Image (spheres, rainbow, N blue to C red):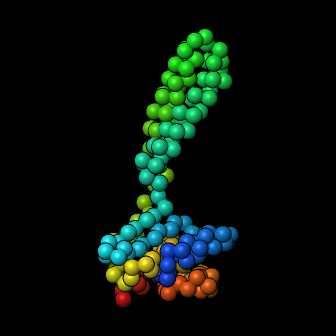
């Protein structure tokens, strides 16, 4: 099953958020990736996608690694060491766990990174049509032709201005 990009323009960021929450709750609608394109009042185009960056993965991995290592050393009886030895043991474990977790989290984020990046020309064409305060939602969905009518019906209560394939938007 091939994936295609579908775009919907909304009257506000709040409406877009509610519509995306609604779409994500539909069990038989398979959204593989989502991105938001918005234009600021200054004309700057903002593109937000659902990828996890290496920095986010490193912070998460480091935090979890430090916590798990510190708790693991404490569980092994490090707190029974007299004096400040217990603090040194737990602190060293947290440091090593944090460093290893950071590296592991960065590697995992790079491996998980799906590479979801709509074509720059299509995004540029779309952003040219956007008004400030009217963001667009780009969805990568399986079998877009078959579900396009359903997407339009699901997004109608959210006043989606346009729901169409991104290729068609770029052609306009």
- In this image, 62 relative to 28: left or right? left
Taking the view exactly as shown, the residue that stands out farthest to the top is 82
- Above-or-below relation of 18 to 129: above
Number of callouts:
0
Furthest residue in direction front, as rendered: 83
In the image, residue 88 sits, relative to residue 5, either above or below, namely above
Write the residue at 57% across / 34% down.
67
Q: Residue at x 58, y 28 (%)?
A: 70
Q: Position of residue 142 (x, y in %)?
A: 56, 72
Q: At 35% across and 76% down in the image, what residue appears?
A: 41
Q: Residue at x 39, y 82 (%)?
A: 131
Res. 8 in view: no
The answer to whether 54 appears left or right of 65 in the picture is: left
Q: Quadrant of residue 69?
A: top right
| Rendered position, 149 above or below 73 | below
Hey, which quadrant is residue 90 in on the image? Answer: top right
Q: Position of residue 22 (x, y in %)?
A: 63, 73
- Residue extending furthest toward the right: 27
């Amino acid at each position: 099953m091939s994936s295609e990009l579908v775009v919907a323009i909304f009257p506000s960021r709040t409406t877009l958020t509610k519509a995306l929450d609604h779409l994500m709750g539909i069990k038989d609608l398979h959204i593989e990736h989502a991105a938001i394109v918005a234009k600021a009042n200054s004309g700057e185009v903002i593109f937000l996608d659902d990828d996890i960056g290496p920095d986010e993965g490193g912070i998460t991995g480091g935090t979890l690694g430090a916590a798990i290592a510190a708790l693991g050393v404490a569980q092994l009886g490090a707190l029974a060491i007299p004096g400040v030895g217990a603090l040194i043991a737990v602190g060293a474990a947290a440091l090593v766990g944090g460093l290893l977790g950071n590296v592991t989290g960065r590697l995992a984020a790079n491996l998980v990174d799906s590479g979801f990046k709509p074509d720059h020309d299509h995004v540029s064409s779309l952003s040219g049509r956007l008004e400030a305060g009217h963001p667009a939602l780009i969805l990568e969905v399986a079998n877009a032709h078959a579900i396009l009518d359903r997407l339009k019906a699901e997004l109608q209560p959210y006043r989606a201005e346009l729901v169409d394939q991104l290729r068609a938007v770029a052609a306009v």
